[in-house]
Image (cartoon, rainbow, N blue to C red):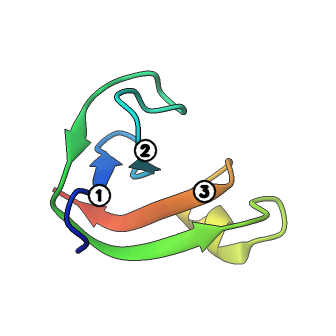
Amino acid sequence: MRYGEKVCRNDKLFVKGDVCPLCGESNFSHSWKGMVIINDPNESEIAKVLKITKKGKYSLWTK
């Protein structure tokens, strides 16, 4: 885990600001494991399995 990286607990998206751009909430965690970067969610089998519809960097597990 990199210091200061926070993840939205709802979407598991890594967020730099104060509000998650996907859900609009501020429910963050600094406790996460694993990471996947989705560049093209429409063509990614991983995105389909994880039910990710937007491009971005996601954690695989978030507390």
Q: Residue 46's image quarter?
A: bottom right
How many numbered discs, if any? 3
Mark nearer the viewer, 3 or 1: 1
The amino acid on which the numbered mark 3 sits, given as a three-letter code, is Gly
Q: Position of residue 17 (x, y in %)?
A: 40, 35
Compare marks 2 and 1 and give the one earlier in the sequence. Answer: 1
Q: Which residue is mark 3?
A: 56
Q: Earlier in the sequence, mark 2 or mark 3?
A: 2
Q: Quadrant of residue 1?
A: bottom left
- Relative to 25, say whether 38 is above or below: below
Q: Nearer the viewer, mark 2 or mark 3?
A: 3
Q: Are dots 3 and 1 in contact, CB under 8 Å?
A: no
Of callouts 3 and 1, which one flags the residue occurring earlier in the amino acid sequence? 1
Q: Residues within 10 Å of mark 1 (few under 14, many from 20)?
A: some
Q: Secondary structure at mark 2?
A: loop
Q: Which residue is mark 2?
A: 11
Q: Assess whether mark 3 and mark 2 are in contact (beta carbons under 8 angstroms).
A: no
Instruction: Give residue 48's quadrant in the image.
Output: bottom right
Q: Position of residue 22 (x, y in %)?
A: 54, 33
Say which amino acid is labelled 1: Glu
Front in this rendered view, residue 4 or 58: 4
Residue at image mark 1: 5
Q: Residue at x 28, y 43 (%)?
A: 9
Q: CA distance from mark 2 to mark 1?
A: 15 Å
Q: Residue at x 39, y 27 (%)?
A: 19
Q: Which mark is residue 13?
A: none
Q: Callout 2 environment at 10 Å: few (<14), some (14 to 19), or many (20+)?
A: some
